Amino acid sequence: MNIIFLEYSTILLFFSFAAVLSFVIFLLSYFLISQKSNQEKVSAYECGFNPFDDARATFDIRFYLIAILFLIFDLEISFLFPWSIVLGNLSYSGYWSMLIFLIVLTVGFVYEWCKGALEWE
């Protein structure tokens, strides 16, 4: 039990320091900055202009599809990087499981492309 604590004590110390520092910075910014609000500060704006339309307008579904595709391929990269680091030490099952994972993602990407989800009209 002592060995595990010694190995992880540096990480625990780092997270504790980060939490305390974040809390101190938040409190300092709250107390040191003047809290005077005026009409300009509390008004809504879009890139410096008054709002053009209602904020509750619906978005096109293609925005959501692009966001989901981005998340999927971003997660793919987060799986690919550690896999590429340990590729020389992996067995054949590790290699083929990642290859199947990549094939499934590629088939999904081709399907989305063929359905026209990536085209803007």
Image: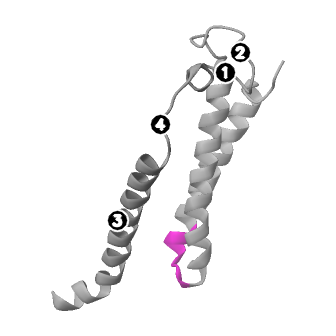
Q: Residues within 10 Å of mark 4 (few under 14, many from 20)?
A: few
Q: Residue 2 or 71: which is nearer the viewer?
A: 2
Label 4 element class: loop
The residue singled out by tag 3 in the image is 20
Is disc 3 in contact with disc 1, using a CB cutoff of under 8 Å? no
Is disc 3 in contact with disc 4, using a CB cutoff of under 8 Å? no
Work out how far the residue at label 2 is from the one at label 1, CA to CA, in angstroms.
5 Å
Is disc 2 in contact with disc 1, using a CB cutoff of under 8 Å? yes
The residue singled out by tag 4 in the image is 35
Give the number of the disc on residue 45.
1
The image quadrant where one finds the N terminus is bottom left
Magenta segment main secondary structure: helix
Residue type for callout 3: Val
The quarter of the displayed image where residue 38 is located: top right
- Span colored in magenta: 89-95
Q: How crowded is mark 1: few (under 14 residues within 10 Å), some or many (20 or more)?
A: few
How far from the left and from the top, in percent, is residue 75? 56, 52
Earlier residue among tags 4 and 1: 4
Residue type for callout 2: Asn
Q: Residues within 10 Å of mark 2 (few under 14, many from 20)?
A: few
Residue type for callout 1: Tyr
Q: Does the magenta stretch include residue 34?
A: no
